[in-house]
Amino acid sequence: MGKQAQNLHEFVRNNKQRARVLAVTSGKGGVGKTSISVNLAIALAGLNLRVVLLDADLGLANVEVLLGLNSLTNLQQVIQGERRMTDILVEGPGGIRIVPGSSGISRLADLGPVARKRVLDGIEDLHYYADCILIDTMAGIGQNAAGFAAAADEVLLVTTPEPSAIVDAYAMLKTIFQMRQDAVFRLIVNLAMNEQQALAVAQKLKTVAHQYLDCELFYLGYIPRDPHVSRGVMQTRPFFLQYPAAPASRRIDELARKLFDMRVTMPSGLPGFLRRFAENLGLVSNA
């Protein structure tokens, strides 16, 4: 990097308002987490935000599959030191930018210290060049998913009304809460028959979280069962763009606007996400 480019890079890093980091997570697969991540990212970008969607599923990346993209670069090259995170950014639909996930990596903790530092540096680069970073975590309560979610400014916990999904959502909430008791949880109920069903699910989880963890769970909203969602998947086109008047699209827009209205000014200095993520990787002490 030339001296002029380096100076510009440092100026941006030192003067850019820190990005807001949202982790979209779930207790199990099959609840629509990635679909929500993609469409919510596009909806937020429609509110004049610069949005980066990071596919943090290091074992089986799905964001590009959902969008019908097939980039030649991915997170694996960052881990191997071949590229920087900003070098692998892919232009996605609706004005978003995507960090393609990798595959075959079981745990970040299994990476060596140099590789883990590369991931952290890459996320730091994204942090200064975006207004909002959405992290689509792995499904389940594994270390990768919980580590990303626990470090985020806010956790968007996705569940469906199915009993097994509710139980697994609580398990994920508990896992994250045990890692970080000041985590901010916002619940999204997907595939609900109606608002009443979604509210019933939310109340059940809120009650259990308060009773057993003394943890507050905020209900953000719901997305109804809508055939337009599966049609968009088959067409490898986000339903929010393909069917903007669909019931699911209208709800995604509501969720995005709620999150936009909840925005807060991030503190200066090392961003909270980076500090927490570094602690999770064991790169800095949490003492």
Image (spheres, grey):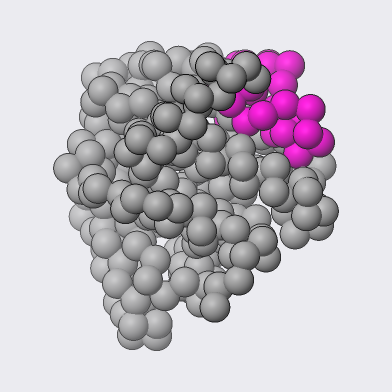
Q: Quadrant of residue 142?
A: bottom right
Left or right, 22 with reference to 267 = right
Judge whether 93 appears above or below 259 on screen: above
Give yes or no for residue 86 being in the magenta stretch: yes
Residues drawn in magenta: 63-89
Residue 267: x and y, percent? 32, 53
Left or right, 235 with reference to 138 = left
Left or right, 116 with reference to 239 = right
Judge whether 200 appears above or below 80 on screen: below
Give yes or no for residue 267 being in the magenta stretch: no
Q: Nearer the viewer, residue 167 or 84?
A: 84
Residue 227: x and y, percent? 40, 27
Residue 66: x and y, percent? 57, 25
The answer to whether residue 39 is seen in the rendering is no
Question: Residue at position x 76%, y 39% from top?
Answer: 79
Question: Residue at position x 24%, y 26% from top?
Answer: 47
Left or right, 50 with reference to 282 = left
Q: Quadrant of residue 205?
A: bottom left
Question: Residue at position x 68%, y 16% from top?
Answer: 70
